[in-house]
Image (spheres, helix red, strand yellow):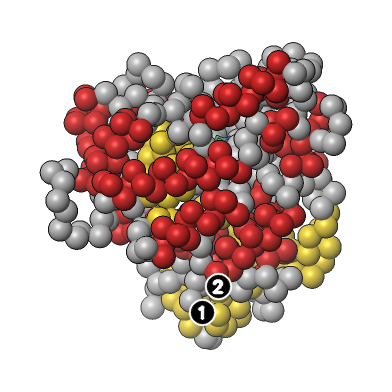
Amino acid sequence: MQILDTVIRNARVVTAADIFTCDIGIRDGQIVSLATDLPTGLKEIDAAGRHVTPGGVDSHVHLDQPTGDGSVMADDFYSGTVSAACGGTTTVIPFASQQKGESLRAAVEDYHRRVGDKPVIDYAFHLIVTDPTPDVLQRELPALIAEGYTSFKIYMTYDALKLGDREILETLSVARREGAMVMLHAENSDCIAWLTERLLAAGLDAPRYHATSRPMLVEREATHRAIALAELVDVPILIVHVSGRDAVEQIRWAQSKGLKVYAETCPQYLFLTAASLGCDDSFEGAKCICSPPPRDPANQQVIWDGLENGSFEVFSSDHAPFRYEGHDGKKAHGESPTFEQVANGIPGIETRMALLWSEGVRKGRITPQSFVALTSTNAAKMYGLYPRKGSVAIGADADLVIWNEGEPVRITNEMLHHNVDYTPYEGMQLSAWPAITLARGEVVWDGEPRGAAGRGKFLPCQKPAPAQTRRRPHELPL
Ligand code: URP
Ligand code: ZN
Ligand code: ZN
């Protein structure tokens, strides 16, 4: 047997299915043996008594994404991926967003330029389709899907991004034909605009009114409509950043009808509430402005229940990094802008895994196996990266997290490695944090960030199995 590069000893390995104790043998960046009493490797890591999980696959992150409103994302493909690695994530899937009037191909080329030699962990891209012209739908999108961009996001809100129902149908039908996964941002744009106009006219413009302008029914209606449009086309969809009961009920209704409707939620819907946007008119609440907004404790419980009972496939960060101070982030429109002028999104790429392991697994709300499924395996499957990513298995990339548990960890922004000047989780007490993160067998975090810029590789994605249509005979000529 050829000598092993690294042996991780006595790991308590967790996969989406099992927990077992063994040594993990790594060669050339891949897991090549799972056994007991492996021969000594060039490097030895003692994991006795520690859980070892697959590295996280964070399938919803925004890095260096132009916004068009004067705000700038604080994390590029270096700081964003360093931060990810320090929090136990070894693969990220950010977005390459088309600008209206621009070709999709141009967007992809632009994002590869932005990546340059920066990433320290592996990455793929989702597309964002904002301008589904005949050329985009008939030529560019199919070609990009064939090249490994096998998922794309559609927005139902935000003027610069949203598609109308007819455009959504046309775009879904390409996804069906080509076998791509469609992610839907489901909020009713007109309801938000109508409420926003009235709130602003009444002088109710503080950050907390962001939540008032996007009540749950706005998300419920759009979620239902997205499901109906997908049912009409007969194509699977994944509803992203689900915030609470109303959307969950729609998703479970669709699932109970046998529709392939998948769902994602994020830490902000477990650990923040609308009250995090402020109880008075102070601007501080802008730190937690994201869409859909966080709800209330009862809805947090609905999200926990959904993680436990299988309503959700994926737990992502929706890392959208805007600085609080300065004039290129939350305050791009001045020191005290109205809520609708504040860039939407919050940071969370580094805290996602530890929040769920500490508050989910260690507090008995979800099993270790569910944690792995939600943070890694399912995302790899949903987006065509499995089995290379998302598991601890022979032949998989040696992307692993060795956990430190039982010691108190107090989250502070100072300990994080993103380029944002705050964390929404400041002061939270956790009982777990990644001790070591390995990406393709290399230590990229062991209490210090270790990954070199440029070591992360682009991952073309397969057509995901969960995106395949149910293939029932269809009366419509799609
Ligand atoms: O508020 C959010 N979620 N911002 C990020 C962009 C998006 O819609 O995911
Ligand atoms: Zn979104
Ligand atoms: Zn997002």
SS of the residue under disc 2: helix
Quarter of the image that includes the N terminus:
bottom left
Answer with left or right where residue 134 lies relative to residue 216: left
| Residue at the spot of label 1 | 18
Q: Residue at x 51, y 29 (%)?
A: 189
**Does label 1 or label 2 sit earlier along the sequence?**
1
Q: Position of residue 383 (x, y in %)?
A: 38, 52
- Viewer-closest of 308 and 462: 308
Q: Distance between the residues labelled 1 and 2?
A: 7 Å
Indicate the amino acid at tag 1.
Asp
Tag 1 near tag 2, CB within 8 Å: yes
Residue behind label 1 places its C-beta within 8 angstroms of ligand 3: no
The one of 19 and 162 positioned closer to us in this rendering: 162
Q: Does the residue labelled 2 lie within 8 Å of ligand 3?
A: no
Q: What residue type is labelled 2?
A: Gln
Residue position for label 2: 369
Residue drawn 61% across the image and 51% down it:
244
